[in-house]
Amino acid sequence: MTVLVASDLDRTLIYSANALALGMPDAEAPRLLCVEVYESRPLSYLTETAARLLTELAEAAVFVPTTTRTREQYRRISLPGPAPAYAICANGGHLLVDGETDPDWHARVLARLAAECAPLSEVRGHLERTADPAWTRKHRVAEDLFAYLVVERDLLPEGWVKELAVWAENRGWTVSLQGRKIYAVPKPLTKSAAVREVARRTGADLTLAAGDSLLDADLLLAADRSWRPGHGELADAEWTAPGVTALPERGVVAGEEILREFLRAARPHG
C-alpha cells in the first residue's frame, strides 16, 4: 500500500523560538534540532525525537512538505531524512519535483486563478489603502500569487481581519491570520489540489495530512485521515470534521505527536 503524508510545516512540524510553547520545567524540556537558518541565525526547530520519527516516516510513506512558504523560504529548511521527491509551496501554487518547479502544474494554477477570482493587484491595492502603518510592519507579495502583511498583533484593531475577510470573500479570496502575518490568498489556490495531483502521480492508496491554520482546512478535509494540533487558527475556532483528529498537544511537542500518529497510520501492523 502506498501512503502519502502531506503535512504543513510552520507551527505543525517545525517551530520558531516564539512558538515552541515549552511549558514544562527547564530540566524536562526536549532537546531541539535547528532545521532552518535565516540571515545567519537559527530560526526553526523540531525536537530530536521528531527528527528521528520524520526519518522513519520517509521510509514508510511518500512524505510531502506542504506549505504556504515561497520556494525560496522553503529551501532554507533542512529536514532530517532523505530529500522529499515532492514538495508543495506557495499554498499549492508550485509543485516541486526533485526540487524543481513543475511548469505544467504552475500554468494550470495560473489559468484557474485568472478565471475564478479578482486579480492580485486589486487585493494588494486594498491592503495598501486600508492597513494602518501604525501596526503594519511589512507588505509582501509571494510568488506573484498572493499577498500578506506582517503586523504588530497587539496593535491590530479588533474586527479588522474580519472586515478584510468579508471584502475578500466577495472577490474569490480568503483571509488567514497566522502569528504576525495576515494572508490574503485566492480561494482556488489550495494545498489540497496539489496534494491530489501528487496522489495521482504516486498512486497513493491512503492520504494523511496535518495542519494548524485556516489555509490548511481544505488539506485536512481532502485527506483520508488528518490531525491538527491544540494551537493555531483551527484550534482557536474549535474546528473539526469527520476524519480529523484534534490533538491536545501544543507547541513543538505537538509536532512530535503528529509524526507519531502519521507513523501509526502508515504502518498499522508495524
Image (spheres, rainbow, N blue to C red):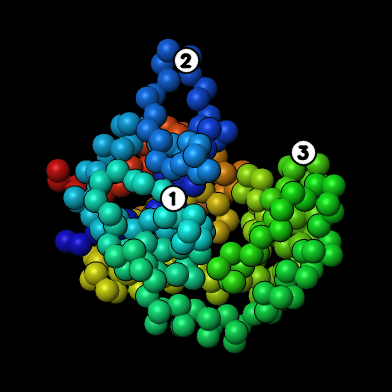
Find residue 172 and report its horizontal and vertical position in percent: 66, 75
- The residue tagged with tag 3: helix, strand or loop? helix
- The residue tagged with tag 2: helix, strand or loop? helix
The answer to whether 265 appears left or right of 145 in the picture is: left
The C terminus is located in which quarter?
top left
Q: CA distance from mark 1 to mark 3?
A: 29 Å
**What residue would you read off at disc 2?**
26
**What residue would you read off at disc 1?**
76
Q: Amino acid at mark 3?
A: Asp
At 71% from the left and 58% from the top, the residue drawn is 139
Near-viewer residue (50 or 3): 50
Q: Please tell me which of labels 2 and 1 falls first in the chain.
A: 2
The answer to whether 269 appears left or right of 145 in the picture is: left
At 29% from the left and 57% from the top, the residue drawn is 84
The N terminus is located in which quarter?
bottom left
**What residue would you read off at disc 3?**
154
- The residue tagged with tag 1: helix, strand or loop? loop
Residue 59 vs 154, above or below: the answer is: below
Near-viewer residue (161 or 19): 19
- Where residue 53 sits, quadrant-wise, is top left
Quick one: label 1, few (<14), some, or many (20+) residues within 10 Å?
Answer: some
Q: CA distance from mark 2 to mark 1?
A: 29 Å
Near-viewer residue (212 or 72): 72
Find residue 212 and report its horizontal and vertical position in percent: 51, 48
